[in-house]
Image (spheres, rainbow, N blue to C red):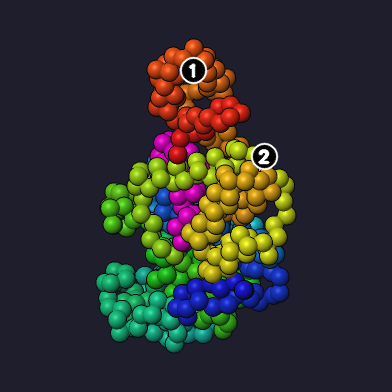
Amino acid sequence: MSLRIYNTLSRELEEFSPLQPGQVRMYVCGMTVYDFCHIGHARMMMAFDVVQRWLRASGYAVTYVRNITDIDDKIIARSVQRGITIRQLTDEVIAAMHEDIGALGIEPPTVEPRATEYVPQMLGIIEKLEQKGLAYRSDNGDVNYAVRKFPGYGKLSGKSLDELHAGERVAVLDGKEDPLDFVLWKAAKPTEPADAKWESGYGTGRPGWHIECSAMSCATLGETFDIHGGGADLQFPHHENEIAQSEGANGKPLSRFWVHNGFVRVDNEKMSKSLGNFFTIREVLQKYDAETLRFFLVRTHYRSALNYSDAHLDDARNSLKRLYTALDLVVPAEVVVDWTQPHAARFRAAMDEDFGTPEAIAVLFELAGEVNRTKSAETAGLLKALAASLGILQGDPRAFLQAGSTLDDATIQARIDARAAAKAAKNFAEADRIRQELLEQGIVLKDSPTGTTWAAAQ
């Protein structure tokens, strides 16, 4: 079975084959860096971390570009509020972002372009659009895109021009010929800091948000590439506008596949700063370990809505304990995955169907059950090797199982020995008390003819 990916552009699953055999070029819209990453950002970056991991596991060489937006109205406002330069702010937030997502095991992209480094390329696209009659200069100094002059506008979102009324997407601004038009180049305002301004043939100003990604994607991957990704909230207008700009300027499809991850929801509402129901990665990691958060994000299909709650994270933690308990029973053998092996074949079939992580993780639990029954080092090795493509189960099992417990190995063993002595003295009440005491601290004892072993409670 070959890899199939849901293409937002066609609204169906399509068989994937890259433009260049064996080489995948993927662009994903990254962070606007004015504040800490929240769980919605983590969900997006985790989704495409899994995508690029599976592409590599499938034998492709991947050029993965995930941009940084480091010039934007919110960035300017925050830098002014804090009394620091834009560069000081963005460097600080980028460092925090790398720390947060690095903790989650999200691998760095091949290229991480910053928008401010690509202003000349943005101006080049704007000049092309103006020459083709798709862009015009306004009296207020802005340069706008003429939406109605691009025949394919709306093909990604499925929105027709007649549906797009003034005020639904953007406020009607002075200087626009049509309320649907969007800004490519913003004229500088006297109140803006000096480091928010660039000189150009259009006057002093700065780029609009949408033109940034058109320039960065085409500069790093070419005018047409394989996959363009991002959160579902970017489908319209951001990605729609990217298509209009890039294809309007170059006359070529921008991306063959458009891939969007689902929202994070809290109490059945989309998580957002405006609703005040968002959680930063840092806040969550104060309460839960990084691998639990990763597993929580990975086990839901990337296109589905993800419901955030402490109860769901607790369940994720317990599920990981079950998997690590199996790996704690026997040292996993080093294995090269044989994709014809039944479990491996089912895992691959799941991932090849639009990166079906829920079904793939179900296979991991099947393998864990088999390890528990057979104590097979080879089966444990296969469990660990398959999990690696999801970025989980690569830590030390005993360390994970003991995390959060105040008991170390020596203390646990001392309590087991005390219980054995109580049983030998026929003091069964004391033996039961020790077992219960350990259970209350997350330690389960398992008696067998050869002795007593322990594992973390599940």
Mark 1 burial class by Cα count in 10 Å: few <14, some 14-19, many 20+: some
For label 2, count other residues whose C-alpha is less than 10 Å away and answer few (under 14), some (14-19) or many (20+).
some
Mark 1: which secondary structure? helix
Residue 373 appears anywhere in the view: yes
Q: Which residue is mark 1?
A: 423
Identify the residue at the far front of this view.
426
What residue is rendered at 39% in x and 71% in y?
236
| Figure check: 282 above or below 9 | above
Label 1 or label 2, whichever lies nearer to me, is 1
Kind of element beneath mark 2: loop
Report the residue marked by disc 2: 331
Q: Main secondary structure of the magenta part?
A: helix
Rendering coords of residue 397 (x, y %): 58, 37
Q: Earlier in the sequence, mark 1 or mark 2?
A: 2
Q: Which residue is drawn at the image coordinates 49% and 54% (left, top)?
A: 298
Whether residue 212 is visible to the viewer of this picture, yes or no, is no
Tell which of 193 and 282 is nearer to you.
Answer: 282
- Magenta residues span 282-302
Residue 64 got which mark? Answer: none
Which residue occupies 50% across, 73% down? 6
Q: Is residue 65 left or right of residue 300?
A: right
Please tell me whether residue 277 is drawn above or below residue 186 in the rendered image.
above
Measured as percent of width and height from the top left, residue 328 is found at 59, 38
Q: Nearer the viewer, residue 335 or 329?
A: 329
| Circle 1: residue type | Lys
Q: Viewer-proximal residue, 121 or 283? A: 283
Total marks placed:
2
